[in-house]
Image: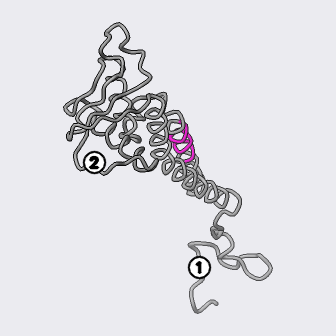
Amino acid sequence: MQHATLKFWFALIGLLLMAAGFFVQQSAKIPLIKKTIAKTSYRASIGLNTVMSKGQIMPEDSGFSELSSLYCKIIVESNRYEGHKTGITTFSDANALWPEKIGLVSGINVSWQDGKKRYTSLQELNNEIDKSFGDSILPWQYGLFFIGFFVNIATFFVTYFPKKTPNPKDNNSGENGNSTEKAGHAKPPHDR
């Protein structure tokens, strides 16, 4: 009976791991999951959507700090960093001067506190957000895979190599399998 219970728990854990793996894989399409396991990319995409819909994003807006950190990562990795010692003040749509063109973003102006302005593209920021998302879910994917792998191996051993439990009938049998004493009816010591 203990063997069946153990198999049930391993099977249940396996099903839960499969469901978790599915949700992690599909997290780009499920905002609640994406928000939980890939917070930086989720909030940066909110910031980028704000630039696209309102024309700019400021430090007090949701997603600004994540978008700033991803942009700084882009310019450092591409050797375009010019030693800015100040932070970013705004991301703005290059078309923001023409309200009818807001949302047709292809270029984004980045303004720094020291007055310098840089230019980036929507595609460059989207690529970095996607990369950040991939980097965020990768540990979850590996973790779920290896936990599932070990649960599967454990289930294999429990199923095909169950622990042998001693049979109570085997303890009372003699050499030829005949029992000389019945359980509960032992002969008195002087009759043996």
User: Which of the 4 quarters of the picture holds residue 110?
Assistant: top left
Our reading of the magenta stretch's main secondary structure is helix
Instruction: Name the amino acid type tagged 1.
Output: Ala
Separation of marks 1 and 2 at Cα, in angstroms: 94 Å
Up the image or down, 3 lies above or below 105; here it is: below
Membership of 15 in magenta stretch = yes
Up the image or down, 46 lies above or below 171; here it is: above
Membership of 17 in magenta stretch = yes
Q: Nearer the viewer, mark 1 or mark 2?
A: 2
User: Which of the 4 quarters of the picture holds residue 153?
Assistant: bottom right
| Mark 2, residue position | 84
| Earlier-in-chain disc, 1 versus 2 | 2
Report the residue at 59% width, 58% height from top: 150
| Mark 1, residue position | 186
Where residue 136 appears, as percent x and y from the top left, is 45, 45
Up the image or down, 178 lies above or below 33; here it is: below
How busy is the neighbourhood of tag 1: few (under 14 within 10 Å), some, or many (20 plus)? few
Identity of the residue furthest to the top in this view: 100
Report the residue at 66% width, 76% height from top: 172
Where residue 170 appears, as percent x and y from the top left, is 69, 73
Please state the extent of the stretch shown in magenta in the rendering.
14-22
Image quadrant containing the N terminus:
bottom right
Instruction: Name the amino acid type tagged 2.
Output: His
Q: Is residue 75 left or right of residue 92?
A: right
